[in-house]
Image (tube, rainbow, N blue to C red):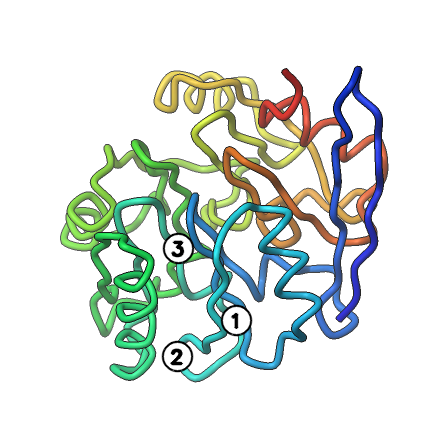
Amino acid sequence: MKGRVVEEKNENRLKLKRLFNHDGSSYIGIFLTCTESVVLLPPHASNRFVVDVERALVVKALRTTIAETFLNGCLAVGNSNGFLFSPYTQDSEIQRIADFTKGLGLKVRLRRLPPGDLMNAAGNIIIANDTVALVHPQLPEKTEDIVKETLEVEVHKGRIGGLKTVGMAAVATNKGVLVHKNASNAELEFLEDIFELPVGIGSVNYGVPLIGTALLANTKGYTTGDETTGAELRRIVDTLGFYE
């Protein structure tokens, strides 16, 4: 794993933009997931990588698997109120995350999606900030209720760029929502209405429209795949509100 830092003067402030890859892959959103306070990353993440991600997002990091895989970004999603996991997540993994968040003084709900549902990759089918979630349009009502109760959010169904896997098509924070560059005007208006935040289109990793595959962000910072261009960084910064 490696990282590089791009420095940019903004009046009297020095901003650090951290760009990474994970084991040679710049699609870090597949392997990591974050909230305002924590980031979950694979067990073999190097100490340097962990420290750099913590600094970029201003969070505490936990090395863990989810469902005995390294696909934390695909199989888990969370906000300041809770985390949702694949139904195949192990008891030991849930307990590790529970112990970690408790140690940080956080009160969060941890819950698996129901077994037997084909739509069980939580990070792929849900995007959420601390108040609103958008989910796969065919998500069962019982699962929708679990999302609402666990994350303490209003839940809406929809598509982004025509895609049902909304978790990979966008990233939402409490300041803004960056979405697939092919999102329609109707989709953008819908997202602005439900999130009540700025919504912008963009891409990552030199033109890839699946924002969630290579961007992690909260209100304090962001990190993205190391193939992301300067123009793409500008869209991230402007939409997610990192300029004062």
Tell me: residue 156, above or below residue 224. above
Q: Earlier in the sequence, mark 3 or mark 2?
A: 2
C-alpha separation, residue under disc 2 versus residue under disc 1: 8 Å
Residue 226 locus on image (x, y percent): 80, 53
Amino acid type shown at disc 1: Leu
**For residue 67, which numbered disc appears in the image?**
2
- Of 67 and 186, nearer the camera is 67
Q: Quadrant of residue 110?
A: bottom left
Q: Amino acid at mark 2?
A: Ala
Which residue is at the far front? 12
Q: Quadrant of the C terminus?
A: top right
Asked whether the residues under the numbered discs 2 and 1 touch, taking CB atoms below 8 Å apart as contact, a structural biologist would say yes
Q: Nearer the viewer, residue 165 or 53?
A: 53
Q: Disc 3 marks which residue?
A: 77
Badge 3 amino acid = Val
Q: Residues within 10 Å of mark 1 (few under 14, many from 20)?
A: many
Q: Residues within 10 Å of mark 2 (few under 14, many from 20)?
A: many
Mark 2 element type: loop
Question: Relative to 157, is 11 above or below?
Answer: above
Residue 109 quadrant: bottom left
Residue at 42% from the left image edge and 75% from the top image edge: 66
x then y, percent, for residue 240: 58, 27
Q: Is 86 situated above or below 67?
A: above
Q: Which mark is residue 159?
A: none
Structural crowding at the residue carrying mark 3, measured as other residues with C-alpha within 10 Å and reported as few (<14), some (14–19) or many (≥20): many
Distance (Cα) linking label 1 and label 3 = 11 Å
Q: Is residue 14 left or right of residue 151?
A: right
Left or right, 111 with reference to 122? left
Q: Dot 3: what SS?
A: strand
Residue 217's x, y, as percent?
56, 42
Residue identified by numbered label 1: 71
Q: Who's the residue at 75% across and 71% down the image?
A: 1
